[in-house]
Amino acid sequence: MTATADEIQRAEASTANNYRPLPVVLREGHGAWVTDIEGGRYLDMLSGYSALNFGHTDPELLAVAHEQLDRLTLTSRAFHNDQLATFCAELAELAGMEMALPMNTGAEAVETAIKTARKWGYQVKGVPPGQAKIIVVDGNFHGRTVTIVSFSDDPKATAEFGPFTPGFVRVPFGDGDALRSAIDDNTVAVLLEPIQGERGVVLPPPGYLRTVRQLCSTHGLLMLADEVQSGLGRTGRTFACEHDDVMPDLYILGKALGGGILPVSAVVARRDVLGVFRPGEHGSTFGGNPLACAVGTAVVRRLKTGEPQRRAAELGAVFADVLSELPTTEVAEVRSVGLWAGLDLATRDGREVCEDLLRRGVLANAAHGRTIRLSPPLVISEEDLRWGVDQLAAVLTK
Ligand SMILES: *Cc1c(COP(=O)(O)O)cnc(C)c1O
C-alpha cells in the first residue's frame, strides 16, 4: 500500500466522516504551494477557503507567532494582556469602526453578531422581550452551530439537527422588494454575506447592497455584513462591501484574520452597537488570547499597507481574463471578483473535476454539485495563477 493510501485508511478509521477530502495527504506548505507525504507538489487554489490569504507559512506572520509563543499564549479575559488592546484598536481602525469583540471561529463571530443585534434591538430599539427578528437571505452560509443552521436552506446542513432557534426570516438574495416586505416593528437586523462564498461566489445584483443599507437606515435596523470569507483583501478591497460603497453597522470577520496560523475571528462595529455588552453577558475562554491577538495585529498591519488588496485586484484582472477563455461548452458561468471565483460546470461534476485537477497538481474545491470555487492565496505569482487555470482548461477539454 502507498503511504498515501495507508494514511487515508487510518484517517477514515478514526476521523468522523463529516468531510470528504480529496485523496491527498499534505505535510508542508510555503506560499501558494504545498507538498504531500510522498513529495508531490500542488498549487493551492483553495487557500483554506480564504483562511490562507497570505499563503502558507508566511515568514513575517510566523516570526510574530514564534515570538509570542515563547512569551505568553493564553491569559483568559479574566485579566488584561498586552496584545488585546492593540489588536482591537487597529482592527477597528482598519474597518472604520470603533470597537472589536474577538472570538475564535467564524461561527462564533456570527453568533456574537446575532447576540449583539438582539441585545441592541431590546435596549436601543425597544423591541418587546423575546420578539427580536433578524432577516437573512436564501443560499446563506454563516457556519455550523445550531442557531446558524436554523436559518440555512441547505438540507444537508439542517436535516436531523433540529429543533432550531426561532427569530429568523429568510428572503431571496438580491431582492430589495422582498427584503422591504419582510421588515416589521420587531426586525432588528439584516444579516448577509455581501458576496456568497459557499454558495459559489455569488455576487449581489448591482445596487442591491445599497438598497439593503438604505432599508436598514430607514427602518432602524443593523446591517450585519458577514465578511468572514469575502473580507481582508480577497476581492481586491479590504471589505467586499467597499465595492458598492456601503458601510455596514457591523462586520463579522474570521478566516484570514488568523493569518492561516490559528483561528481568530471578531465582530467589529461602532460603540453604539457593540457597546451593548456588559461583563458576564458574552465571552470565550480563548477569544482575545495574546497569541491570536499578536497574529491578528500582524494581519491587520499587512492589510494596512494595501499591498494584499492591490495584488488581489491586479491579479484578479488576469484571473477573470484567463477564466473567460475556458471552453464555454464546459463552463456554463464564471463569477469572479479579485482572486475569488465560482465556476458552474455545464456537464461535469465539480468533485470529479477537482480529482482530475489534483492529478495535475492543483488543489481546488467543489462548493457543491457542478460548482467549483477557486480562491488562490493573494501571494500567488501571475505565472502560477496562469498555470493553475491552464490545468483547469486541460482537465475540461480532455
Ligand atoms: C467559513 C464561514 C463562516 C464560518 O467560519 P468557521 O470558522 O468555519 O466557523 C461564517 N461565515 C462565512 C461567510 C464563512 O465563509
Image: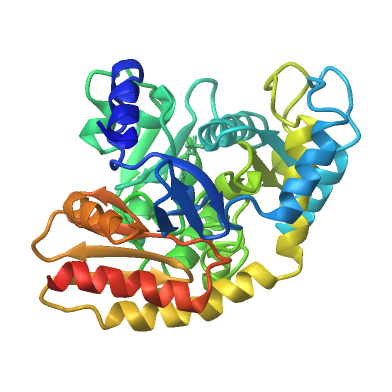
Give 26 or 324, whichever is nearer the viewer.
26
Q: Residue at x 61, y 61 (%)?
A: 247
- Relative to 89, residue 166 above or below: above
Query: In this view of the protein, which residue sits in the foreground, 169 or 338?
Result: 338
Q: Quadrant of residue 4?
A: top left
Task: Tell me the residue at 20%/57% (across/down).
Answer: 353
User: Which residue lies at the image location 12% right of the left edge and 70% below the top edge?
Assistant: 398
Q: Residue at x 17, y 79 (%)?
A: 327
As drawn, which residue projects farthest toward the front?
Answer: 1
For the question of whether residue 233 can be seen, the reply is yes
- Is residue 195 placed above or below 69 in the rendered structure? below
Picture coordinates of residue 87, whole percent (x, y): 80, 44
Quarter holding the N terminus is top left
Of residues 325 and 158, which is closer to you in this image? Answer: 325
Task: Report x, y in % for residue 198.
Answer: 36, 49
Colouring method of the image: rainbow
- Choose between 5 and 222: the one closer to the eye: 5
Image x and y of residue 386, in percent: 40, 77
How far across and how far down the image is residue 132, in percent? 49, 30
Which quadrant of the figure has residue 291? top right
Q: How many marks?
A: 0
Compared across the picture, whether 358 is left or right of 66 comes to left
Q: Does residue 162 appear anywhere in the picture? A: no
Q: Is residue 119 above or below residue 293?
A: above
Quarter location, residue 99: top right
Side of 102 relative to 125 (left or right): right
The answer to whether 81 is drawn above or below residue 25 in the figure is above
